């Protein structure tokens, strides 16, 4: 490592021939191998710059015999880059590899097997498999932990070979190694194998899970992440198991590494599904809040991930950050993505107790400079009014003052949300309609325009000059966007129903309907035009009742995620899935879906909304290698265990045979059936289109074959 | 849940160092660099780039995401194609920056190029090509990758030459039973230093009322102790620290039982713990019947040590502001006082008159107007 700090000069494009000549020259008279070292550095620098150095393969490989660790490392780096491309020459290196595999120095042993595992060529993998067995039992921990990861690599290159050589069992033994780093790497390798669609299924039983928990304290942060993540593969069979583990894991929330903290939270959220002790659940929820808040004082990228996850967590466990809305108040220098995420959380956390502060804060944001942020703030004020009734008055007041600013995008947003407020509180705030109408000319966005038109149509009886306004608005009817046109048609019809006596209104509605049916190409619009026309033609009185029928009240519950989907998504807390709020198998190929596994300990509510996993089984079927201890039965073959709830037990006895048909007849008596069917995604109905015919066939359809993945869905609604 | 690799870009978005991306096509890292530079071009400020960029691929089935952080003008990218925890990627990137910092001091593109062979060794040791972080504790790393500046020192101490490498200790790397501390450390004088720094973050409303405030504290340590020291640090008022997060060396059980910090420290610089300060009054059980929100408000509110009054007037082509600040502290002076005013986007300059012997300036790149004085108010 001579010439420290001067290595930048190596970053000059070099010619292959020159390097070759230099390497050959270095073979003689090379004291302490300095010449070779310099040439190799130049070569590595050139690799970095993206120059193809593969032509030097044979020359570089010859340096492997040099008894200097630094040179070995560079040659191995070279091999990692070009080994795969030079399959026909790789046999030159094998003897050196084998020699290094048995070197006295553990660093070199580890380096050799690691490099070999990076080159997935059969020759290399073959010689590695011969060696690896010894390395997995090496007396040096560094070699063992490297060997553990190498197993995953061999498995990726040739799964069946790795299984044949019993590497998976050897890895399993490493899970109880005395060195925590080795344990963590063994777990990491097993997880990687288990995540493969054709991999050995990796599950943990209580004994091993407890061993891993013990290793947790001594592991590095990455090791802790692997171990905590792998504990998600443990399925608690009783409340007590889940609770005990939760108690042991909860202190990891105090770790300095935010990834450890978030993985811990993921594990706790998972375990909580299997807990019964209310005090403990509350305690854990309370413990989870502060570390999440702490993440908000880290870098913006950590904040972003934390905020996206908080959004999910508080929907499922509102207790976690109940009293902490203030920590989500935006700072002036927050990046825009952080501000928007915070805004959403502020809205979710708003309740009667804190709504005043939240509203004051939102009003502040509405006068910011960033347009996106301002729009979302204004919209949040409106949503707040809908969510918290006590604050509706204050929200309307602040919306009105925002409309007064005459800033176009503020006014438009305000009008869009006001429309929803009218629907939420009918007959309460119509007094502000005149103020809204004053700003008619400022509206240039379809959504705002449509909202305003809806208001005019809906309250045409209260707006004296509604017909004039509509006349103005329909002036450019044919140029408007579809959204606005639809709103205009409906509003015109409503206006006519309110003021059927006025000739001008009659003319207006006739004009609009004629345009819609004769000059518009959009089938939706045309159909709606025809529908209204016939309605009015047949019986205007009935038409009025239909068009102005009472509307179902709106709530903000609709934007909350479905509980079952939420449970499933929370199994991915912290991962990409939680950032996009999507299950990873929907956007990552080969990603294994996750679902809560049903055991007697699973709380009844989670069970009801359980969304089954849609894992596509590979045609050959997975090879199951037992972990230490008893093998867990595969979930899809197991009938659901009885609910702890007494009320449902009669139904249960029947479902053990999976007698779908009979039970759905009984189902009506069950307390939970109604709630259940509401929560259940349409999937189960779709999976069994003959469900209603079951009684006719005497349960015949149930015994037929069906995709394994959906079976659980059929069994579940029986509760 | 491994990451795919790591790319270090300099300020011109040219790669300085990157891992091999062996599992992927050669285009894979380029796609990510492109995605990053495209996102950087469309964002107004570097800070506004989404931290997790979605990267579409040639193969529509295999999209990926790109996590990135900024450090000292460098950008570190970490492509992620499996359902990995992005925090995990971020934590690794930060750790890697810390390691580089530990090895080279200032982490800049020239520094990385100067020591690229060491950087590569570090990458090899910290991240295997499958994307699993390996050894990231600086203590253990120093056994495997010899830091440039320490080279001569280590050679002279251990008498290492050639191949025999670090294993001549007779123990080898990772012989230490404690992952964060290397074995066989020896110092002539044994000492350990602690720095406690606390940061107050507060949001103050227009009328001067503190809306929200928190104090975040951090204990940094520099340990120069021989052997395997087992330390016990007793805090007189441990109650004031809420929500602590610890370096892995601290025995969590011990802390939760008796509020003492018991640990075997790593060698060298490390952050012992971080915490949130909560005033003693909050610890007293609240009187029964107090509404929940009132308790929540009391819990972390800390008085801001100065009062701030601001008046603004905005006109068409500019504005005026008048800010007055007064210290609330009666006994002590506030030292090294700096106030930064963010003038908002589009600001091109400012002109201020400041009292009290303070100085002011304007930083065009950030539209910020810092005003500072060595010592303010008594």
Image (tube, grey):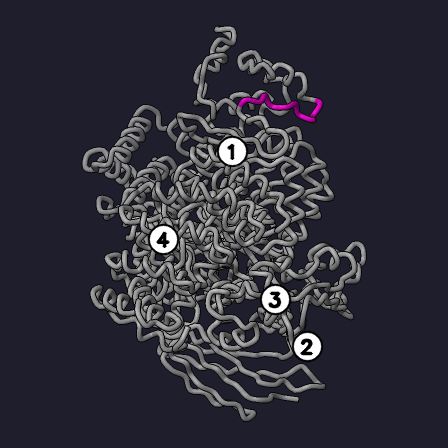
Kindly report the distance in space between the C-alpha atoms of the residues bearing marks 1 and 4.
27 Å
Label 3 vs 2, first from the N-terminus: 2
Q: Quadrant of the C terminus of chain A?
A: top right
Label 1, on which residue?
A: A201
Please state the horizontal and vertical placement of residue B32, each as a whole percent of the image.
33, 55
- In the rendered structure, the answer to whether residue A481 lies left or right of residue A210 reads left
Total numbered circles: 4
* 2 or 1: mark nearer the eye: 2
Query: Is B66 in the magenta?
Result: no
In the picture, the disc for residue B21 is 4
Q: Quadrant of residue A616?
A: top left
| Crowd band around label 4 with a 10 angstrom C-alpha radius: few (<14), some (14–19), many (20+) | many
Query: Is A640 in the magenta?
Result: yes
Kindly report the distance in space between the C-alpha atoms of the residues bearing marks 2 and 1.
51 Å
Kindly report the distance in space between the C-alpha atoms of the residues bearing marks 1 and 3.
52 Å
- Looking at the picture, tell me which residue is in the foreground, A561 or A492: A561
Residue B355 visible in the displayed image: yes
Kindly report the distance in space between the C-alpha atoms of the residues bearing marks 3 and 2.
43 Å
Picture residue at 67% right of the left edge, 60% below the top:
B243
Please state the horizontal and vertical placement of residue A167, each as a whole percent of the image.
50, 38
Label 3, on which residue?
A: B211
Most common secondary structure along the magenta stretch: loop
Q: Are marks 1 and 3 in contact (CB under 8 Å)?
A: no
Label 4 vs 3, first from the N-terminus: 4
Picture residue at 52% right of the left edge, 74% below the top:
B155
Check disc 1 and report its element: helix, strand or loop.
Answer: loop
Q: Mark 3 falls within which chain? A: B
Please state the horizontal and vertical placement of residue B60, each as a whole percent of the image.
30, 42
| Residue bounds of the magenta highlight | A637-646
Label 2, on which residue?
A: B191
């Amino acid at each position: 490592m001579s010439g420290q700090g001067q290595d930048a000069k190596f970053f000059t494009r070099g010619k292959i021939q020159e390097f070759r000549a230099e390497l050959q020259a270095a073979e003689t008279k090379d004291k302490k191998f300095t010449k070779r070292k310099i040439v190799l550095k130049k070569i590595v620098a050139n690799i970095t710059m993206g120059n193809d150095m593969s032509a030097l393969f044979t020359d570089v490989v010859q340096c492997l015999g040099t008894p200097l660790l630094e040179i070995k490392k560079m040659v191995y780096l070279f091999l990692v880059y070009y080994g795969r491309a030079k399959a026909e020459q790789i046999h030159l290196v094998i003897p050196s590899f084998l020699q290094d595999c048995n070197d006295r120095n553990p660093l070199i042993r580890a380096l050799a097997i690691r490099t070999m595992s990076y080159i997935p060529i059969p020759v290399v993998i073959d010689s590695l498999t011969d060696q690896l067995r010894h390395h997995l039992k090496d007396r040096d921990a560094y070699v063992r932990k490297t060997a553990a990861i190498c197993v995953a690599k061999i498995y990726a290159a040739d799964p069946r070979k790795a299984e044949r050589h019993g590497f998976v069992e050897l890895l399993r033994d490493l899970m109880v190694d005395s060195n925590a780093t080795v344990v963590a790497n063994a777990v990491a390798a097993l997880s990687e194998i288990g995540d493969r669609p054709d991999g050995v299924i990796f599950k943990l039983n209580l004994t091993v899970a407890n061993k891993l928990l013990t290793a947790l304290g001594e592991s590095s942060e990455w090791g802790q992440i692997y171990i905590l993540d792998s504990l998600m593969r443990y399925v608690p069979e009783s409340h007590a198991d889940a609770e005990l583990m939760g108690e042991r894991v909860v202190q990891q929330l105090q770790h300095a590494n935010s990834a450890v903290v978030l993985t811990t939270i993921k594990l706790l959220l998972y375990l909580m599904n299997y807990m019964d002790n209310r005090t403990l659940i509350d305690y854990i929820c309370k413990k989870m809040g502060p570390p999440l808040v702490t993440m908000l004082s880290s870098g913006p990228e950590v904040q972003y991930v934390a905020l996206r996850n908080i959004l999910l967590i508080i929907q499922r466990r509102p207790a976690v950050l109940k009293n902490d809305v203030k920590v989500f108040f935006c700072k002036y220098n927050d990046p825009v993505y952080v501000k928007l995420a915070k805004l959403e959380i502020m809205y979710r956390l708003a309740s009667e107790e804190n709504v005043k502060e939240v509203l004051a804060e939102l009003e502040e944001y509405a006068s910011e400079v960033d347009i996106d942020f301002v729009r979302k703030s204004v919209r949040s004020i409106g949503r707040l009014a809908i969510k918290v009734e006590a604050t509706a008055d204050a929200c309307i007041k602040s919306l009105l003052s925002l409309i007064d600013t005459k800033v176009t995008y503020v006014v438009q947003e305000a009008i869009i949300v006001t429309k929803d407020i009218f629907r939420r509180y009918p007959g309460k705030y119509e007094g502000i309609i005149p103020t809204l109408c004053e700003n008619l000319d400022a509206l240039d966005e379809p959504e705002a325009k449509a909202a305003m038109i809806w208001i005019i149509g809906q309250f045409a009886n209260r707006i004296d000059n509604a017909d004039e306004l509509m006349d103005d608005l329909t002036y450019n009817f044919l140029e408007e966007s579809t959204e606005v046109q639809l709103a205009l048609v409906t509003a015109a019809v409503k206006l006519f129903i309110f003021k059927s006596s006025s000739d001008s209104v009659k003319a207006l509605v006739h004009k609009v309907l004629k345009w819609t049916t004769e000059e518009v190409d959009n089938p939706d619009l045309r159909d709606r035009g025809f529908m209204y026309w016939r309605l009015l033609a047949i019986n205007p009185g009935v038409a009025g009742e239909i068009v102005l029928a009472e509307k179902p009240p709106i709530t903000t519950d609709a934007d909350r995620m479905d509980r079952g989907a939420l449970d499933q998504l929370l199994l991915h807390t912290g991962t990409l899935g939680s950032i996009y709020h999507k299950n990873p198998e929907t956007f990552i190929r080969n990603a294994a879906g996750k679902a809560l596994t049903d055991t007697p300990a699973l709380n009844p509510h989670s069970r009801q909304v359980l969304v089954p996993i849609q894992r596509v089984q590979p045609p050959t079927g997975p090879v199951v290698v037992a972990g230490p201890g008893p093998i867990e039965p595969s979930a899809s073959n197991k009938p659901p265990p009885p609910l702890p709830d007494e009320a449902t037990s009669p139904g249960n006895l029947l479902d053990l045979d999976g007698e779908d048909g009979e039970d759905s007849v009984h189902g009506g008596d069950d307390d939970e059936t109604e709630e259940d069917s509401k929560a259940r995604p349409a999937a189960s109905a779709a999976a069994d289109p003959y469900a209603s015919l079951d009684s006719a066939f005497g349960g015949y359809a149930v015994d037929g074959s069906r995709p394994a993945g959906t079976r659980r869905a059929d069994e579940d609604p029986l509760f | 849940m491994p990451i795919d690799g790591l790319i270090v870009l300099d300020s011109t978005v040219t790669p300085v160092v990157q891992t091999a991306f062996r599992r992927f096509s050669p285009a894979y890292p380029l796609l990510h660099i492109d995605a990053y530079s495209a996102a950087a071009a469309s964002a107004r400020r570097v800070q506004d780039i989404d931290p997790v960029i979605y990267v579409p691929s040639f193969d529509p089935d295999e999209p990926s995401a790109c996590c990135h952080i900024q450090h000292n003008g460098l950008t570190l990218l970490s492509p992620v194609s499996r359902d990995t925890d992005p925090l995990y990627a971020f934590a690794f990137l930060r750790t890697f920056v810390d390691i580089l910092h530990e090895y080279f001091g200032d982490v800049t593109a020239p520094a990385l190029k100067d020591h690229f062979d060491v950087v590569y060794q570090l990458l090899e040791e910290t991240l295997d090509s499958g994307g699993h972080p390996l050894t990231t504790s600086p203590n253990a790393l120093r056994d495997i990758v010899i830091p440039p500046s320490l080279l001569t020192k280590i050679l002279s101490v251990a008498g290492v030459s050639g191949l025999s490498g670090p294993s001549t200790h007779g123990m080898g790397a990772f012989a230490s039973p404690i992952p964060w501390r290397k074995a066989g450390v020896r110092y002539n004088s044994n000492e350990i230093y602690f720095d406690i720094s606390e940061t107050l973050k507060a949001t103050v409303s227009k009328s001067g009322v503190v809306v929200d405030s928190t104090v975040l504290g951090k204990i940094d340590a520099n340990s120069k102790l021989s052997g395997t020291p087992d330390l016990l640090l007793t805090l007189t008022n441990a109650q004031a620290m809420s929500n602590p997060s610890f370096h892995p060396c601290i025995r969590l059980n011990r802390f939760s039982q008796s509020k003492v910090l018991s640990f075997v420290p790593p060698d060298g610089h490390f952050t012992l713990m971080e915490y949130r300060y909560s005033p003693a009054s909050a610890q007293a059980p609240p009187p029964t019947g107090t509404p929940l929100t009132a308790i929540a408000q009391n819990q972390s509110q800390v008085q801001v040590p100065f009062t701030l009054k601001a008046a603004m007037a905005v006109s068409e082509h500019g504005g005026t502001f008048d800010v007055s600040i007064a210290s609330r502290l009666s006994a002590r002076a506030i030292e090294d006082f700096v106030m930064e005013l963010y003038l908002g986007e589009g600001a091109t300059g400012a002109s201020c008159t400041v009292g009290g012997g303070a100085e002011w300036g304007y930083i065009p790149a950030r539209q910020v107007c810092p005003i500072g004085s060595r010592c303010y108010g008594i």
